[in-house]
Every structure is written in C-alpha cells, then in structure tokens.
Image (cartoon, rainbow, N blue to C red):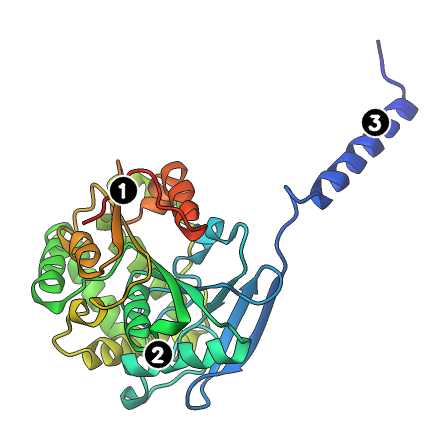
Amino acid sequence: MTMSWFDARSLAFAIAGLILVLAASPAFAQPPVRDGYARGADGVRLHYRIVGPGTPSAVFLHGGPGLHMGNGWPDLAGLGEGRTVLLYDQRGGGRSDIVTDPARLTAEDHVRDLEALRQHFGIGKMTLIGYSWGTGLAALYAAKYPDHVDRLLLLSPMPPAKTPFAADRALRERALTPAAELSRMEALDRAMPDAADPVATCRELDRLGYGPYFADPGKLALMKGENCDAPPAALRNSGTVYAATIGSLGDWDFRPLVRGLRVPVLVVEGADSQIAVGSPQAWSDAFPNARLLLIPHAGHMPHIEQPDAFFPAARAFLSGRWPEGAIGH
C-alpha cells in the first residue's frame, strides 16, 4: 500500500513528537552545564565547568600538569551520572590564567587553588576524582585537608614515588616507542614554546605519544579527549607548567603523606598496562582503606579500552560501594 503525502507528514510529526518526549525524559535529558571563572589562592583566575544541578559533590582533577579539563573528562563523562561534578583548568593551562613564573606553579599552588575553589563553591566534603597527575594532586590535597574529602577515585595514576616508579615508567615508555618517533617527539617538545601552530604541534605529539598507553593501540582512535583544545598561549606554556610543578615535588614519595588517611580509596588501572608496572599496587598499599581494581584486557587507559567494565565499577565506588573485583590489602 502506498502512503499518501498527508499520511507521511502525519507520521513524521508523530515521530518528531516522540523524540521530543524522550529527550525531555530523565533517561535522555542531558545534565545542565555551567561555565565560569573563579579566583584561585593568589588571585589567579581559574576557568571552571559544573556538570549537573546544584552544588558539586565531586571534583575532577585532570592530568598534566600543564593541560586542562579536556585531558580525561570527555572520555570519563560517564562518571557524572547521578552527581554534580566540578571541573577546572589548573593554573597556567587551558582557559585559566597563563602563569609563567615557575615560583607560582608549584604543587602547593595547585593544592591551594583546589582549596580556594572548595571554599568558593561552598563544598563541605568532596569526592576527588584524580586522573594521571591529578591523582598526585588529589593525594596532596587529601593529606593537607583530610576533613574536606570523603573518598578518592584514582584513575590511571601517576607514579606514587619518583624512585623507583617514575624512573621505571620513563624507561618503559622509551622502550615501547620507536626511536624515530621518540626523536620526533623530543624535537616537538623543544619547538612547542615558540611553535607557529601549537595546536598542530600538540596533536602530532599526542598521536606519537599515546601508543604505549594502550594494550590495543588501535583503540587510540576511540579517545574523545582533546589535549590540544586550548588557547595557543596555554599550549606554548604547557612545558613550563609541567617542569615547574613536577620539579617542585623534588624526590617525591606520596606514600608517607597518605598513611593516616582513613577515607575509602579506589585505584584503577588496566591489567595489561605496560608502563605502570607495580605503581598501582604501591598506591593502593599506601592507604589504610584502599582497594585496587585492575580492568582486564586494558592498558593505561581502561576507561577507553574497556568502558563496559570500567564505568559500572567506578560508579559503584562513587555511590559508596566497593566494586566487584576490587582487591584489598
């Protein structure tokens, strides 16, 4: 039977109406997003984003240092389900103020910025979701302000100590990167502060550098995060922020700082990570109330490689439950 023009139009309107109803329903509604600026510890202007209604209960700490909320969050946005999350670009990077003085780019400055944001938004206790370098920042903050933290989710963590973990990771990353690509990456790093097109330079660095982070390098194409979506001045400044912040840690070891921290801590890493051998377990062992979750068939980016295993487990922990498979002391 041939459908008339009138019937086809009526069907189209009915479908459009159904789509509008579904989009308005809780299952399909997107959480509200608010962007703005707040002052850090010494007046540095910090760009923030709040995903969800009301006062944030969780804060996402991106990787780097020297990057911005685009490092990690687009791929981790599923953690925002059922809660309001505060994201922000750490000082010196992204759309926050471009701080170039190394004396104002220490790890302690980052801790003070986080405390300034907590006070600005009136958060009593917050869940800290640390990603990569953000795990170190989370540990430093929690050690200094334990009364303002209710739990820590440490994802693909940075080395818990410079010796031996950071040195071992650097050796592993070099061994997993072809010599020609390693040489090109070093040249791009040197060129970045004066790059005519820092976005292109950044994207080439990402393309070359992320391979060792995946158990299946083909899944790099699934990554939504965009380290390079930042003003050119911020990209050119990224190396300065990184060197100053990591340099300020000296011969760091976070483990003694967190041994008295009683809040629940979940450390998540891929079971097949080739760069973080021993490091996730060391993080977990350092906390009195921590568990380690190793995601099967994933490298250093388990949320991208195995999202069906990662997100239910991470959301369970954020909701107050230990996920199945998490290993205690």
Give SS at disc 1.
helix
State whether residue 129 appears in this view: no
Residue 247 falls in which quadrant of the image? bottom left
| Badge 2 amino acid | His
Q: Residue at x 14, y 58 (%)?
A: 169
Give SS at disc 2.
helix
Residue 84 image point, x, y percent:
54, 60
Query: What residue is shown with label 2?
Result: 110
Crowd tier of the residue under label 2, counting other residues whose Cα lies within 10 Å: few below 14, some 14–19, many 20 or above: many
| Badge 1 amino acid | Pro
Q: Residue at x 24, y 70 (%)?
A: 189
Marks 3 and 1, how far apart in space?
Answer: 45 Å
Quadrant the N terminus occupies: top right
Q: Residue at x 25, y 81 (%)?
A: 244
Residue 162 image point, x, y percent:
12, 68
Marks 3 and 2, how far apart in space?
Answer: 56 Å
State which tag comes first along the sequence, 3 or 1: 3
Question: Pointer 2 and pointer 1: residues touching (CB < 8 Å)?
Answer: no
Question: On the rendered structure, is 257 left or right of 148?
Answer: left
Query: What residue is shown with label 3?
Result: 11
Extreme residue toward the right, this view: 6
Nearer to me, 100 or 120: 120
In this rendering, the label closer to the viewer, 3 or 2: 2
Question: On the rendered structure, is 69 left or right of 272?
Answer: right
| Badge 3 amino acid | Leu
Nearer to me, 31 or 3: 31
Residue 65 falls in which quadrant of the image? bottom left
Looking at the image, residue 230 lies above or below residue 308? below
Looking at the image, residue 307 lies above or below residue 252? above
Give SS at disc 3.
helix
